[in-house]
Image: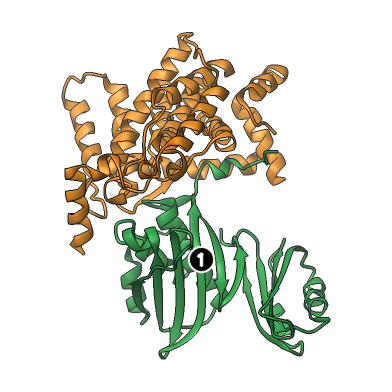
Chain colours: A orange, B green
């Protein structure tokens, strides 16, 4: 078992292995099952993620409230037909994150990772990164194991709930998980993976959870899109040798303390932030009065 | 001391969106009622408290609850059409907003009825990440997570009852994980909630019912 990133780093050094190896070994021990059992269960999750990241691109979705949908299609068509600012890879990832988020908001099937509201980031990151280097499903399963290991550390030492820690705990955790997963997929070291994760959380520390009308729609879908870009940028930095000045464990502690000091109005109650802007209020009245 | 957690507490559940607490958790609560009752009913009332009451339509909490009482799972695509499916099966559904006081913000009371007669009542909360806690069954306060199979027995509070009930469970080769006993007052109705490691066979209900002074037995298998 591991509770801190520095323990995982030490274990990886001693056993000369990757984060995913440590994570699967722990899971086998915890569930008293074989590696094949764990991998086949993760493969099922991967399949759901692939579908969610694609179906919102193939077909326009509309959310339950009618507030969001169709943006994944827009971004995908834009990247196919126009010269983009961020390039094709980033735009593919954005489209996939929007797709999964829009599928979620339209009552489609998704895999929460770490939550339903942040379920676009890790799939978009892992599928896009794997596509770029021609990695197969087995490599993607490893990447999801690594992402889950990062999520376990955040859940143990802080929280992955927006109601408890704000959006930094959901989209921040998702981005850190995705960043570390990409680093491992690209052959980076265990230290690099944690630097990437730390930088990803640092980049959105303090982000509040302020869903308009209390729904997992605005601004959630777009935060998934920028969340995957955050993860990719942090992975690139770490792979280039950029280090986080503050270690991962301390960044997670800081994130938790910040979450605890956030007023309840900014923790998924829809009583502050974007939810209580004039437009946010008007949307709430429209949506809630609709039925 | 931190406890070990599974990767599937981070990855998943695989579910119909949009919210693990307002959709997946709601579906599980509905399914718990469906599983524990295990018999026919022609209408169901959902009393919604707090955040459930405020946002149930936008989150599809209503559809998820109905999918649950129809026995669907959280990743069933038909969840979206659960209202129509209920109608086609002749089950009427009703949603009532209610302030239940100092309880979890995502709390629901589910009342299953037949011919206008209330048959079964379950109160539970969706506590995040699709996890639930059942806090009341047929008026008895208890605490069930749904992660383990459960046997709930109501009986007259007299000596020897627990050993008779657990004796039946042991005879079925079922191991008891936790056991909690509560009673209204001495000599009145007592309730024992027994979480087990493995699934109890259906026949366990009849055998426990055979014990003198047992009023009711409910069984809930783990909700995946």
Residue A171 lies, with reference to residue B71, above or below; the image says: above
Residue at screen point 73% across, 82% down? B186
Residue A121 location (% of width, % of height): 39, 34
Residue B68: name its quadrant.
bottom left
Q: Position of residue A224 (x, y in %)?
A: 34, 35
**In this image, B32 relative to A52: left or right?**
right
Looking at the picture, tell me which residue is in the foreground, B58 or B16.
B58
The residue nearer to you, when weighing A283 against B16, is A283
Q: Is residue A55 left or right of residue A148?
A: left
Name the residue rendered at 16%, 26% in the picture. Answer: A81
Screen quadrant of the C terminus of chain A: bottom left
Q: Is residue A36 visible?
A: yes
User: Which element carries disc 1, helix, strand or loop?
Assistant: strand
Query: Please, which chain is the residue tagged with disc 1 on?
Result: B
Q: Position of residue A3 (x, y in %)?
A: 65, 31
Which residue is labeled 1 in the image?
B124
Tally of numbered tags: 1
Question: Image check: A227 left or right of B101?
Answer: left
């Amino acid at each position: 078992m591991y509770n801190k990133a520095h323990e995982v780093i030490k274990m990886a050094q001693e056993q000369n292995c990757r984060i995913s190896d440590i994570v699967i070994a722990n899971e086998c021990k915890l569930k008293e099952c074989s590696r094949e059992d764990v991998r086949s269960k993760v493969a099922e999750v991967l399949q759901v993620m692939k579908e969610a990241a694609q179906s919102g691109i193939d077909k326009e979705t509309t959310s339950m409230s009618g507030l969001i949908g169709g943006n994944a299609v827009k971004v995908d068509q834009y990247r196919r037909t126009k010269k983009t600012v961020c390039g094709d890879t980033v735009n593919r990832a954005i489209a996939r994150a929007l797709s999964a988020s829009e599928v979620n908001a339209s009552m489609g099937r998704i895999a929460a990772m770490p939550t339903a509201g942040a379920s676009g980031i890790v799939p978009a990151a892992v599928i896009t990164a794997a596509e770029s280097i021609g990695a197969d499903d087995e490599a993607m399963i490893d990447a999801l194991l690594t992402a889950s290991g990062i999520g376990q550390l955040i859940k143990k030492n802080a929280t992955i709930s927006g109601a408890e820690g704000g959006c930094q705990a959901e989209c921040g955790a998702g981005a850190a998980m995705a960043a570390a997963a990409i680093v491992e997929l690209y052959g980076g070291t265990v230290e690099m993976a944690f630097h990437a994760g730390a930088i990803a959380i640092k980049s959105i520390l303090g982000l509040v959870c302020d869903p308009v009308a209390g729904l997992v729609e605005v601004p959630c879908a777009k935060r998934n899109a920028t969340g995957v870009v955050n993860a990719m940028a942090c992975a690139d930095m770490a792979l280039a040798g950029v280090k986080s000045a503050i270690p991962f464990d301390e960044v997670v502690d800081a994130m938790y303390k910040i979450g605890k000091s956030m007023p309840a109005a900014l923790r998924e109650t829809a009583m502050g932030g974007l939810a209580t802007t004039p437009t946010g209020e008007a949307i709430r009245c429209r949506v809630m009065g609709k039925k | 001391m931190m406890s070990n957690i599974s990767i599937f507490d981070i990855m998943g559940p695989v579910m119909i969106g949009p919210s693990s607490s307002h959709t997946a958790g709601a579906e599980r609560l509905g399914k718990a009622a469906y599983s524990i009752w295990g018999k026919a009913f022609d209408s169901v009332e959902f009393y919604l408290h707090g955040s459930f009451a405020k946002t149930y339509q936008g989150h599809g909490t209503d559809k998820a609850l109905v999918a649950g009482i129809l026995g669907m799972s959280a990743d069933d695509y038909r969840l979206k059409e659960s209202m129509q499916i209920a109608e086609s099966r002749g089950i009427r559904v009703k949603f009532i907003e209610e302030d239940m006081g100092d309880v979890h913000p995502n709390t629901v009371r589910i009342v299953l009825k037949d011919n206008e007669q209330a048959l079964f009542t379950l109160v539970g909360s969706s506590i995040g990440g699709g996890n639930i806690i059942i806090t009341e069954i047929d008026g008895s306060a208890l605490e069930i997570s749904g992660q383990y199979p459960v046997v709930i027995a109501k009986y007259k509070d007299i000596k020897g009852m627990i050993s008779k009930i657990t004796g039946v469970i042991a005879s079925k080769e079922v191991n008891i994980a936790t056991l909690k006993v509560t009673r209204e007052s001495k000599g009145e109705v007592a309730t024992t909630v027994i979480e087990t490691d493995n699934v109890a066979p259906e026949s366990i209900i009849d055998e426990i019912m055979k014990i003198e002074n047992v009023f009711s037995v409910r069984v809930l298998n783990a909700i995946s």
